[in-house]
Amino acid sequence: MSRRPVAQINLAALGHNLQRVQQLAPASKVLAVLKANAYGHGLVKVAQALTAADAFAVARIDEALALRTAGIVKPIVLLEGFYEAAELPILLANNLQTVVHNELQLMALEQAELDGQLKVWLKIDTGMHRLGIAPEQFAEFYRRLWQCPAVQPGIRLMSHFCCADIPGSDKTEQQQALFQLLCSDKAEQQSLANSAAIISLPQSHADWVRPGLMLHGISPLPNQSGQQHQLQPVMRLSSRLIAMRQVQAGETVGYGGNWQAKVTTWIGVIAIGYGDGYPRHASNGTPVWLEGREVQLVGRVSMDMITVDLGECPTETIGAEAVLWGPELAIERVAQCADTIPYELLCNITPRVNYQYLTGQ
């Protein structure tokens, strides 16, 4: 019996979720965001499965080169752009597109002596205040990029919402209005909508949408599940019950003794912990799906193990499968119990977990 946790990645569910994006934004092209190892699902495998996407987006050049090495030929956009001028020939040789979001990048393009031209996305900071040029810089950047010999004609215009996951946010309306004020008279293709905006702000879809989290079947909106948006979970994280013991009323379990049994009960030990990426700060009561029923986490999460309350008369035996999140148990619930977000849970999965890719329904 293997004690190694397993992350099953359902590629059919991934395809279903892409179709759902296309249903929600039928007039838009899809720039599928695969940064951070495709949100912990496996960069290359996910890209190979998303054959219906129009292009891929990653954060950094090493991610893009990994896709090219694996034979991915679709357009790839670097969301953080390039870091130094020496990378520009690499971008050109690998047919990579770059976001431009600051003066240094613009100057590097103007000074570059390349054998071809690069496709550029100009990012405008409409209120996120992370990456992007200031609105008052837009006219100058737009003009200089059009005049730059290293840049392909037809730059693309983009921005990023900071509060799209907060329904009714005035900030989102302000950002969209500012972007439209700057870009409405431009013929170039435009992109604003991330996963949250794809679902809740159809007026922001524009020419390109940028789904990330929702491709993996998870809701980007608070207190909602992917199922509510007709999405299917892609990852099923599971492990095994490796020990059982009875504890008496008043006895404690785990480091610090922060959980105390109120009655005599059975405790189950499951082979997963923060060394595998399970959240260390998951609280007592966090749900775990154990062979057809929901049990609760008790005691602190250890590096390699968690403990759950099996009740007074458990029917499970050692070797029983435990699902930490997946179709049986929404990851959104687990994230809430750990005072975090699903993004972090997915990205924190470590190499100790065995990945299995499923192609069937």
Image (cartoon, rainbow, N blue to C red):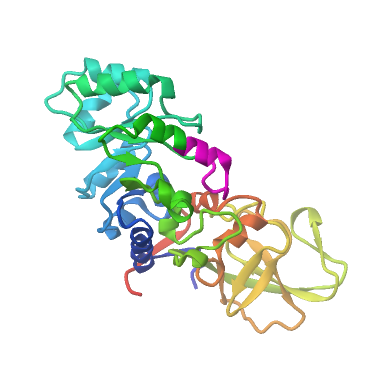
In the picture, measured across the screen, residue 248 lies left or right of residue 160, that is right
* Residue 139 seen anywhere in this rendered image of the structure: yes
- The residue lying furthest to the right in this view is 250
The answer to whether 103 is drawn above or below residue 157 in the figure is: above
Is residue 184 part of the magenta span, yes or no? Answer: no
Write down the quadrant of residue 337 in the picture.
bottom right
* Residue drawn 54% across the image and 48% down it: 165
Write down the quadrant of residue 231 in the picture.
bottom left
Q: Nearer the viewer, residue 280 or 139?
A: 139
The location of residue 360, given as percent across then percent down, is 33, 74
The answer to whether 338 is drawn above or below residue 13 in the figure is: above
Residue stretch rendered in magenta on the structure: 163-176
Quarter of the picture containing the C terminus is: bottom left
Is residue 172 part of the magenta span, yes or no? Answer: yes
In the picture, measured across the screen, residue 43 lies left or right of residue 224, that is left
The location of residue 230, given as percent across then percent down, is 45, 67
